[in-house]
């Protein structure tokens, strides 16, 4: 362990200088390229951190601040009583006092980075007095320790707000509504990652696809460079100081959301004795004292407070009462180690170094796809995997009174599901099972306990295997083409079923004859001009809503749901859904023969975090569809109040392809643009490229950056 920590220190603080001076902004140079991407050059890593936070604040201070307000559990102070329960959820796990204490105990190299974070954000507030924060008027160096998880839905946010409210605040009055259409109405989340070995590429170099499916403006594009060995490019979650999904001169990393079991719930047996609460554990009763948490919230023009009494067992905080059992939860709570891993990986140079950062085991909600300039490709399924007794069903709450259900440490990376350099030369993960990650060369399920990989296959996973397995001689452009392949494999199963139902119908509805023929002749590929794409999606959406109370993704994922729709629904249900689709299209657009691109739109008119949409305002046609149907290029869209057109909010966001040769080559595109300011030329300057699947060349080397520099400056100067 001692040697391992020395190794990490060497990576993270290579040639570290003694200190970072917040006033020394002359050591920080920001070069904005023609797309507004900030290339931050610093003498030290701390300088680069200072600059990248400063640049993020320039681009979208609202998102930076909001992420920290949320992480600190203080959203109710700016948005009112309705956010109290989400604040309570955050504060069950970490608060500012704990974060400040962790900061004080942090190693010197990390303190420099944390100090630089605060200095950079505060320098921005000094330089831009017109910016009026909603809450945070001074950033503190401990704040990143409350926001060390870079994914779109961290572990804490998986906890049900309704369960928390029912337990701790039953009179709260806030409605925690399910999406329209229940689970079926919720857009699938996730990402795609591909890695190709030299044997599959035209150049003989390894290639990597970075394709997160997040809300569109969740991460901007940045470049961080220092004289201490940092040179990382990619997507950064607003307010964080490490490249979350990206690459350096030698390797690259892509994270996809994982279903590897990193969280457990425990049914606690509560005993009341002499007025005090206890919980049963083995043959003993353990005290269960209450802990007070005081939350402030906006109340009209003023502020009010509400006090909660919360409970914790040794498993973790109590989060619900189900069937008379209090439910506690265990999850990863190592903020300093998580931040160390997140930052250190960006400075690794080899597979061996990267693998050692994975041994910190704090990337709890993600899988990782990897490639490097030595020709290695690798896959890690999850990272934080507790060792458990396999006799229990860990997909459900387990008996907290039984000591046998306690975690028994963590699995090593070697013990976890992983893949290195498969013989067929390719790796893919699309939030799908790891047991198809490399086709026939994939890890085998029988080698691992079920809780390590309960993930289902999905249509994106099937699609990815299809585009990778029989192709070779990949270039960056060919990899882009694979990532944007327009086939929708779910409709291979769905469309023949509705065609068969129509052909069996006696008498057949003449109004459906032409729509059925359109579907029958469809090649299952999306395009802006495709009438069949629109008709198929409207029909399948309606059929899915019909059966949403009969089948769930929990019963086998999207494949099980689609198979149920195709094979278990009646002919009448299929045809009724098709009739409904035709009727809605006719009513909303004047004809059911409406091309998909006239319906499915990209619109960005404000810098609001929750975007408004308006059919009367300009928008762009988009060919891509929901990933539910197997679209690799995902675009999660739906109609909104007052609209008949569908507007996208999530899916393809930052997309990059990278080639690791003697010099790294990369291309990228970002939804909309890098700035959150509607008056900026970089608010929508990539929107047309995004629509067409066209990528810009990434400027990685300083001589290339300076040739296309739009602005070069020092913060505060």
Image (spheres, rainbow, N blue to C red):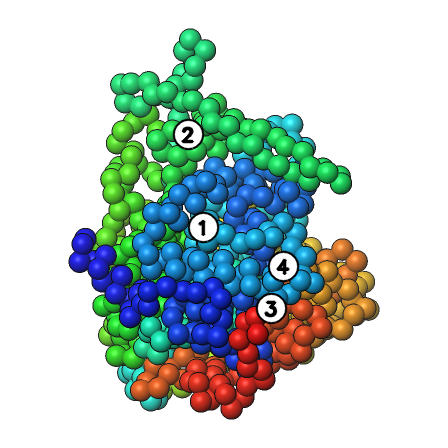
644 or 248, nearer to the observer: 248
Label located before the other in sequence (1 or 4): 4
Q: Which residue is mark 2?
A: 312
Q: Residues within 10 Å of mark 2 (few under 14, many from 20)?
A: some
Whether the residues at callouts 3 and 2 have beta carbons within 8 Å, the answer is: no
Q: Quadrant of the C terminus?
A: bottom right
Residue 75 image point, x, y percent:
61, 45
Q: Does dot 3 land on a helix, a strand or a loop? A: helix
Instruction: Compute the Cα span from label 1 to label 3.
Output: 23 Å
Q: Residues within 10 Å of mark 4 (few under 14, many from 20)?
A: many
Disc with the residue nearer the chain's start (3 vs 2) = 3
Which residue corresponds to mark 4? Answer: 62
Q: Earlier in the sequence, mark 2 or mark 1?
A: 1
Which one is closest to the eye, mark 1 or mark 4? 1
Residue bearing mark 3: 59
- The image quadrant that residue 616 belongs to is bottom right
Q: Are marks 1 and 3 in contact (CB under 8 Å)?
A: no
Badge 3 density bin: few <14, some 14–19, many ≥20, Cα 10 Å: many
What residue is disc 1 on? 142
Q: Secondary structure at mark 1?
A: loop
Q: Position of residue 671 (x, y in %)?
A: 59, 71
């Amino acid at each position: 362990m001692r040697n391992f920590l020395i190794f990490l220190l060497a990576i993270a603080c290579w040639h570290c200088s003694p200190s970072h001076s917040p006033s020394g902004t002359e050591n920080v140079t920001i070069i904005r390229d023609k797309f507004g991407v900030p290339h931050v050059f610093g003498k030290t890593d701390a300088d680069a951190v200072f600059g990248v936070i400063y640049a993020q604040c320039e681009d979208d201070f609202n998102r930076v601040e909001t992420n920290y307000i949320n992480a600190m559990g203080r959203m109710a102070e700016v948005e009112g009583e309705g956010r109290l329960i989400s604040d309570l959820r955050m504060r069950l796990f970490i608060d500012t006092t704990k974060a400040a204490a962790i900061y004080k105990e942090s190693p010197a190299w990390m303190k420099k980075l944390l100090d630089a974070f605060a200095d950079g954000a505060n320098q921005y507030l000094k330089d831009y007095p017109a910016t009026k924060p909603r809450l945070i008027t001074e950033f503190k160096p401990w704040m990143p320790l409350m926001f060390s998880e870079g994914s779109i839905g961290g572990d804490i946010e998986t906890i049900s707000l309704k369960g928390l409210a029912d337990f701790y605040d039953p009179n709260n009055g806030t409605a925690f509504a399910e999406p329209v259409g229940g689970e079926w109405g919720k857009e699938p989340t996730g990402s795609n990652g591909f890695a190709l070995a030299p044997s599959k590429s035209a150049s003989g170099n390894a290639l990597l696809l970075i394709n997160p499916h997040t809300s569109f403006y969740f991460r901007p594009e940045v470049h961080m460079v220092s004289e201490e060995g940092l040179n990382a490019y990619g997507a950064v979650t607003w307010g964080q100081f490490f490249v979350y999904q990206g690459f350096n001169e030698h390797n690259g990393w892509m994270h996809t959301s994982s279903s590897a079991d990193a969280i457990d719930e425990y049914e606690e047996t509560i005993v009341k004795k002499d007025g005090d609460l206890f919980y049963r554990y083995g043959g003993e009763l353990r005290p269960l004292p209450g802990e007070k948490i005081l939350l402030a919230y906006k109340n009209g023009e003023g502020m009010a407070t509400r006090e909660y009494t919360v409970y914790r067992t040794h498993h973790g905080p109590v989060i619900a009462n189900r069937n008379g059992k209090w439910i506690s939860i265990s999850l990863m709570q190592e903020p300093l180690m998580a931040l160390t891993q997140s930052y250190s990986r960006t400075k690794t140079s080899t597979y061996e170094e990267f693998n050692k950062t994975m041994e910190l085991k704090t990337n709890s909600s993600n899988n990782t796809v990897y490639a490097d300039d030595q020709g290695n490709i690798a896959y890690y399924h999850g990272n934080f995997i507790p060792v458990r007794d396999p006799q229990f069903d860990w997909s459900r709450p387990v008996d907290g009174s039984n000591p046998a259900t306690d975690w028994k440490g963590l699995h090593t990376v070697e013990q976890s599901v992983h893949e290195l350099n498969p013989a067929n030369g390719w790796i893919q993960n699309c939030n799908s099972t790891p047991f198809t990650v490399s086709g026939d060369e994939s890890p085998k399920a029988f080698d691992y306990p079920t809780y390590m990989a309960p993930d289902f296959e999905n249509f994106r996973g099937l699609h990815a295997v299809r585009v990778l397995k029989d192709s070779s001689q990949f270039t960056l452009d060919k990899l882009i083409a694979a990532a944007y392949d327009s086939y929708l494999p779910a409709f291979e199963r769905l469309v023949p079923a509705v065609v068969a139902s129509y052909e069996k119908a006696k008498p057949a509805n003449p109004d459906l004859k032409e729509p059925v023929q359109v579907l029958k002749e469809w090649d299952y590929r999306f395009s802006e001009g495709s009438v069949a794409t629109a008709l198929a999606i409207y029909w399948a959406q309606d059929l899915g809503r019909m059966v949403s109370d009969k089948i769930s993704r929990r019963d086998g994922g999207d494949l099980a749901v689609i198979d149920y729709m195709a094979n278990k629904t009646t002919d009448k249900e299929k045809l009724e859904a098709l009739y409904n689709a035709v009727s809605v299209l006719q009513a909303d657009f004047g004809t059911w023969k409406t091309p998909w691109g006239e319906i499915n739109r990209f619109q960005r008119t404000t810098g609001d975090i929750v975007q408004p949409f308006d059919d009367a305002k300009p928008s762009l046609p988009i060919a891509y569809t929901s990933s539910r149907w197997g679209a690799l290029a995902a675009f999660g869209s739906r109609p909104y109040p007052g609209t008949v057109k569908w507007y996208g909010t999530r899916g393809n966001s930052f997309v990059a392809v990278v080639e690791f040769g003697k010099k790294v080559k990369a291309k990228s595109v970002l939804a909309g643009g890098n700035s959150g300011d509607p008056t900026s030329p970089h608010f929508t300057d990539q929107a047309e490229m995004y629509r067409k699947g066209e990528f810009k060349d990434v400027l990685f080397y300083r001589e290339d950056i300076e040739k296309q520099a739009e602005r070069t400056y020092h913060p505060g100067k």
